[in-house]
Image (cartoon, rainbow, N blue to C red):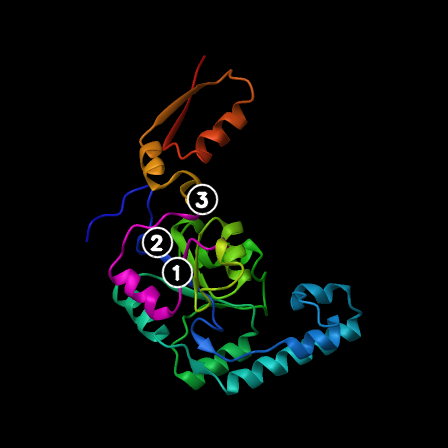
């Protein structure tokens, strides 16, 4: 395998993987539309965050309805195709991974039992601590893997996964929903878990998220050439912050602030 060099990137270079649960490893076919109709007039409100405006009685009722829906879904859980193969590949390569989900822990454990999925020792769920897209949820997961956030990739099928990864400073991989309206938040999109696994087994250079707009405007050759540039900016230059931002936006590979 040819080594992939910056400015290109590939998830095979990540030291650890943070995996969403529902839709990535297990399919419980959760449909929250009735709950949203009951409590939020059908609006696409984030349920866990939206309940902050409720009375304690309303919160209790909503928690109960969400819990019951998740447990019923867990009873019917099926494995996502090639999810187990993906995890086995990670284990074979000694690449650490962890599960981070907005679901309750009871439903995750029940679904894992139903599909015979070997959960890691630590599962991050909503029962304790922050939840995606709060970056703290992913920072805690990275810490569990003894890694920095920038060494990890978040694998998810929903916007919370991608936005959470962006906020946390880690790579974001979208799976199972290649046509999602929010796919632009992802570093890479894989239609299925099989596609992700095959990409890891035979990696090819990818354009990282931070340069997708630049490549769309100026082309990949521009990025490759710009990356070879080393720019020096005197430390007394006016509006030095804006100059640095512009250099980074245009793909400069090295930026040095030199004494005037």
Residue 17's mark? Answer: 1
Q: In the rendered image, is residue 94 in sight?
A: no
Please tell me how crowded label 1 is: few (under 14), some (14-19), or many (20+) other residues with Cα within 10 Å: many
The extreme left residue here reads: 1
Residue 68 lies, in percent from the top left, at 63, 83
Q: Are marks 3 and 1 in contact (CB under 8 Å)?
A: no
Residue 187 among magenta residues: yes
Sequence-earlier tag: 3 or 2 = 2
**Residue 14: which numbered mark, if any?**
2
**Residue at position x 24%, y 60% in the image:** 202
In front of the other: 213 or 242:
213
Residue 168 lies, with reference to residue 48, above or below; the image says above
| In-front residue for pair 259/31 | 31
Which of these two is toward me, 180 or 77? 180
| Disc 3 to disc 1, C-alpha distance | 20 Å
Q: To which quarter of the image does residue 32 belong?
A: bottom right
- Pointer 2 and pointer 1: residues touching (CB < 8 Å)? yes
Which residue in the structure is indicated by mark 3? 210
């Amino acid at each position: 395998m040819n080594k992939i060099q910056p400015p290109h990137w590939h998830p095979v270079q990540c030291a650890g993987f943070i995996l969403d649960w529902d839709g990535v490893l297990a399919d419980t076919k959760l449909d929250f539309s009735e709950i949203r109709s009951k409590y939020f007039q059908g609006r696409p409100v984030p349920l866990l965050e939206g309940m902050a405006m409720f009375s304690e009685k309303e919160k209790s009722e909503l928690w109960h309805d969400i819990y019951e829906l998740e447990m019923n879904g867990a009873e019917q859980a099926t494995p996502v195709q090639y999810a187990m193969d993906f995890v086995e590949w990670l284990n074979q390569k000694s690449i650490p991974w962890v599960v981070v989900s907005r679901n309750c822990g009871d439903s995750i454990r029940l679904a894992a039992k139903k599909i015979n999925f070997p959960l890691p020792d630590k599962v991050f769920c909503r029962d304790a601590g922050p939840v995606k897209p709060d970056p703290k949820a992913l920072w805690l997961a990275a810490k569990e893997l003894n890694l920095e956030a920038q060494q990890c990739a978040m694998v998810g099928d929903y916007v919370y996964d991608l936005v959470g990864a962006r906020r946390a400073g880690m790579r974001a991989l979208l799976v199972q929903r290649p046509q999602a309206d929010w796919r632009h938040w992802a570093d890479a999109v894989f239609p299925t878990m099989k596609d992700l696994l095959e990409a890891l087994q035979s990696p090819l250079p990818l354009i990282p998220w931070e340069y997708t707009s630049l490549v769309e405007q100026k082309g990949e050759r521009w990025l490759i050439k710009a990356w070879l540039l080393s720019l020096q900016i005197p430390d007394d230059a006016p509006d030095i912050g804006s100059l640095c931002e512009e250099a980074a936006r245009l793909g400069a590979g090295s930026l040095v602030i030199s004494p005037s």
